[in-house]
Image: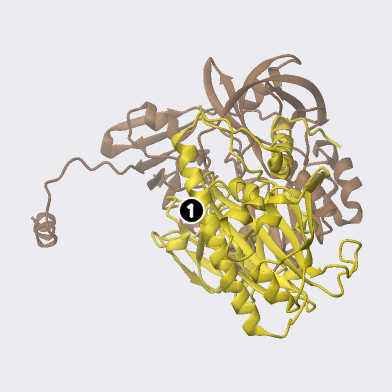
Amino acid sequence: MTAPRPFPLNAWYAATWDSELRHELLARTITGVKMVLYRTENGDAVALQDACWHRLVPLSMGKLIGDDVQCAYHGIRYNSQGRCAFMPSQETINPSAAVRSFPVVERHRFVWVWPGDPALADPALVPDLHWNKDPAWAGDGKTIHAACDYRLIVDNLMDLTHETFIHSSSIGNDAVAEAPFDVTHGDRTTTVTRWMVDIEPPPFWRKQLGKPGNVDRWQIIQFQAPCTVAIDVGVAPTGTGAPEGDRSQGVSMVVINTITPATEKTCHYFWANVRDYRIDEQRMTTEIRDAITKVFGEDERIVEAQQRAIDENPDHVFYNLNIDAGAMWARRQIDSMLEAEAQTKRGVRLAG
Amino acid sequence: MRSDRNWTNATVAHIRDAADGVREILLKPEGGASPFPSGAHLAVRVIIDGKTDLRYYSLIGETLVDACWRIAVKREEPGRGGSRYMWSLPVGARLEVAEPDTHFELTRQAPEYLLIAGGIGVTPLVGMAGRLVRSGRKVRMLYAGRSRLSMPYLDDLSAVLGDRLEIFAGDEGQRMDLAAEIAKLDPAGEAYVCGPIALLEGARSLWQSSGRRPEHFVYETFGSSGRFASERFTVHAPRLGVSVEVEAGQSMLDALEGAGVGVVADCRRGECGLCVVDIVSFSGTIDHRDIFFSKAQHAENKKLCVCVSRVSGGEITIDASYRGDEPLLSGPEIKRAVSA
């Protein structure tokens, strides 16, 4: 028996960083769909099915002729809407010849694609990650192509207890694992809030704050189904009112994460770390990005090993702990999107 | 992308007359009807003289009606028998249908859309008109037919499109001026066309001579309409010593295959160009019903697609591709063989 696919298709998924997409062909698998992406000469982002209508050869092996993609095999050309624009050795073009074109929007420094029903692709549904392109914030990020189910990374982000153990040299300390947390949720969002009041900051945060003494530290993890996690983190000197809402004496970061399923066991993990202090210091941006790259490398090692272990134990059922509540709600929300899609497919969506 | 179809059993849930000679049928498949993009069609297994055959019907509208797929079938007399079968089905009858499929899809971003419908060819365009209006796209529709009474969905389209719909009723002497309509369209605009072969070919040829990009002219054909009524004729293939009658309800391809003439074919609706044979001679008129050849190629009458094209008022002599087996030869050897 094959398990049902673990990701909804009716959702926006980050496909590339905006800077990664040029006037050249980029192959990328998203939710099990092989896509070829490129920019037109005007700079518009395009995503087409990466398989020639005629013989299924990946179009990404071909080349761009102006804004058309030419298949490497027989030279059949498709325009940026996926419609055949040239067919060899005949005076006409076969009217059936077309490849799927996927809705695309560019927002918050990412190019997003919608693999499901194009009629439902409302750009307003793109997760609001505005900090990534907001002049009041500075930062940068990278992509990790991870060999694991995207949900293992969602799980990882929904509970930061692991910082104490995986990231003990940088952002983790005992306070993270000891402090209590609250889990709240809506229909498509889950929030895990953890305040560590009057603690000694770990080395990374001591440096960011640049002030002596104990701090109040916060981690507010915000999940939006199916795969986006924005984490509001920071520290402020104890006694300056951060838990009550005054963060003016502290420093804030948003850790932006959106984890696009490639296949059932691989994903494209786009992350960025943006801050609201010393925003004109590029050196700091680069240093933080490199430090986080190292931190996330530690996570990647763990979740990929976890995926291998899951594969070796296909019948294993996880026993969940109290710390897993955030991840459990996130997974329930993913499942509810999957169920809604299955209902639509069964024709429950009626006319009107 | 083409895929093997998922077949399912469906029940005729409702029947009504959509126009003179056009019947609307609601089909309720087992396990629920899946949604579909406008322009999609259903494949239906029809039974003609005890034999199963395939017919394609465009889905009407954008959404399910009472959890059913909606199609419209024009009674074709004489036809190949598909419409007769569909018309014979009472409410409650069961038949086999495949999940909706499409190769007539709307793009999303054209600056302007021109929908051109001829007769029953309006069916896939009904959903497209609704979709374009709802998404706020600039759209116009030209809809031609024999008479208003014979044209289905006039009221529905009027309600959706208002004065963006123009109706051309033949019996009222109204004709489309396609050249002028194409000239008016935005340079990056797209045309979506469905109707009889003469309309398709005429519009395509005007589109081509206007210098517009060919992929902005989007159309669909099921290869069923000709300029002349289907009638019985004889096809001769002298190289193979074959002469065979093509019945009015039969394709030339089926007749040739039945007589043991090898022909390769794929689409069987005049698109792919695989079943092309050489025309040696003919009398009467060749009724080219394919859209594989250009209008100019049709006028030359050198080749035809045997899956859909026919002869009216005469007969035809063709040459299929069989030449017997030859030894493997190099170029110079072939020359010697020819001169010998």
The color chain A is rendered in:
yellow
Front residue of A164 and A75: A164
Counting labels gives: 1
Image: A130 above or below B107: below
Q: Quadrant of the C terminus of chain A?
A: top right
Parent chain of label 1? A
Q: Residues within 10 Å of mark 1 (few under 14, many from 20)?
A: many
With A145 as the anchor, is A337 left or right in this view? Answer: right
Question: Which structural element holds mark 1?
Answer: loop
Front residue of B196 and B155: B155
The color chain B is rendered in:
brown
Q: Residue at x 35, y 31 (%)?
A: B243
Front residue of A188 and A39: A188
Q: Residue at x 43, y 61 (%)?
A: A88
Q: Classify residue B12 by image quadrant.
A: top right
Measured as percent of width and height from the top left, residue B2 is found at 52, 42
Q: Classify residue B108 by image quadrant.
A: bottom right
With A37 as the anchor, is B149 left or right in this view? Answer: right
Which kind of residue does numbered mark 1 sit on? Ala
Name the residue beneath numbered marker 1.
A51
Measured as percent of width and height from the top left, residue B124 is found at 71, 43
Measured as percent of width and height from the top left, residue A42 is found at 64, 76
Instruction: Examine the rendering and report whether any part of residue A82 can be seen.
Output: no
Instruction: Examine the rendering and report whether any part of residue A277 can be seen.
Output: yes
Image: A199 above or below A318: below
